[in-house]
Structures are given as C-alpha cells and as structure tokens.
Amino acid sequence: MKKILLILIILTFFGCNKKEKNLNSVKTKAKTELTVKSETIFWLDTISNDKFLKIYSKPENEWQNLTAEFGNKNKKYKINLKTEEYGMLGIPFTNQIEWITEKSFALINGCGTNCMYVLIFNTESEKPIVMPVEYYPEIDYADYITDNPNLYIAVDQNNDNSLNLIIIETDSQKMDKVNLPKDWNRGIGQIYSIIDKIEIKNSKIKIVQYQENGMKKELNKTLTLK
C-alpha cells in the first residue's frame, strides 16, 4: 500500500511539472504574437458578415504610410492610401466607420460640414471610391431619415444656379437626381441652409423647407436608381 502511494506521489509530481512547462510554452507563444502585432499600428481592423477592412501603418512613420487591406473570403485587395488620389480626405482621417452595407464599408472625413468626402471600400472592387458627401446614414447634425441605410446623398450645382441632390446607392453606385427649384435658394446658398428635412421611404423622397411665416415648401419624387 505504501509503495502504491509513493508511486502516485511521484507520478503527480511529474504530471504537475509537465503541466507547468506547457503553460510556460503557451505564455511564450502569446508574448511572441503580441510582439509581432506591436510592430504595426492598426488604425482600423473590422469584420462584418464575411467581409473585412484593415487600415494600418508602421510606427516609425505613423500615418504617413497608411495601407488598406479589404475583401471577403473570395477576394482580397491591398492599396496604399498615401497617394494623390486620396489626398482630399485629409489623411490621417477618423478611424470610425460611418456605415456598413452588404458589400461595403464607408468612412468620412474632410475639412468641415461643408467639405466632406466619403471613402467607400466595396469588397468586390479593387479600389475604393472617394467623392463628396452631404447626407449619409446615421448623420447626427442633419434631419435625414431613410428606411434604406444603403443610400447617401451628394450635392451638385446645376446651370440654373440652383442645387441638385444626387441620391446614391452605396454598393451598386446607382443614382438618381432631384433638382431643387431656384426659389428655394436662401442664406449663403449652402445645402444645410436651404433644406430642413429629407425623408426617403419606400423609394420615395420628400424634401422640406420651413418658411419664416410658418408655412413650408415640400418636394416629392419617386426615386429611380440607375
């Protein structure tokens, strides 16, 4: 009985010693992985419904060598964001994704509310799209409501010295245009001084301007994106 007890004690000792060595091995491996990751600054690293977007740089150059990797389980793209093509974004830009669709990630940056650009990474296109933007999903300083979180709105000036709203579908880049009447112009002519509310529901857009006398102007159109 004493011999059996002695054998059990010896086995337990070697078992604990082996377990301790295994734990040390795991810790070393984890530390090595952390060291490798620390050589890269990840400005953005996100996954959504089998698609991903990473924007990163090297510590020695901070944001001056931004690289983007994006794609899905079938395709992967890698581009340099420090080019003239994306210079209008004012990099380094926010690392907040403003909206996500079935195929795309959208980031916004610029020089203020009247100078904004959207950078759209579509995981089925090898290069992101960059263009001016005014209204977008979840915008927090304008009255923009929509039942289609895929839509954003740009503004263009037409030949009649009035403004056009360009409604754009994020993934397909299909669009429609709404011409604002010239008599809507007021203030300094910027879109947020002209329009008080935009609502898009069931493919119909309603644009509202409130008057000082309590009346309101309303423009309605059925959208045909193409």
Image (cartoon, rainbow, N blue to C red):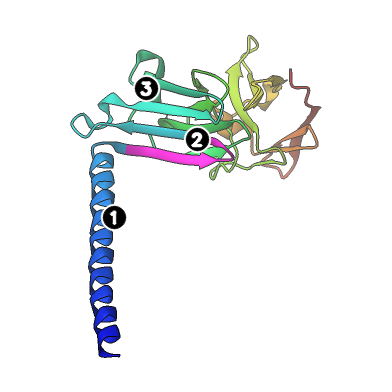
Q: Position of residue 145 (x, y in %)?
A: 67, 42
What's the residue type where badge 3 is placed?
Leu
Q: Position of residue 22 (x, y in %)?
A: 28, 59
**Residue 170, placed above or below residue 10:** above
Q: Which residue is mark 3?
A: 81
Mark 3 surroundings within 10 Å by alpha-carbon count, few (fewer than 14), some (14 through 19), many (20 or more): many
- Range of residues picked out in magenta: 42-51
> What is the distance, in whole Å, between disc 2 and disc 1 at their CAs?
28 Å
Q: Nearer the viewer, residue 185 or 92?
A: 92
The residue tagged with tag 2: helix, strand or loop?
Answer: strand
Q: Which mark is residue 26?
A: 1
Residue 48 included in the magenta stretch of the image: yes
C-alpha separation, residue under disc 2 versus residue under disc 3: 17 Å
Q: Amino acid at mark 2?
A: Phe
Residue placed at 61% from the left, 14% from the top? 161
Judge whether residue 141 is colored magenta: no
Viewer-proximal residue among 71 and 193: 71
The residue at the point 23 percent across, 52 percent down is 28
2 or 1: tag closer to the N-terminus: 1
Does the image show residue 202? yes
Residue for badge 2:
52
Q: Where residue 26 sits in the image (x, y, percent)?
A: 29, 55
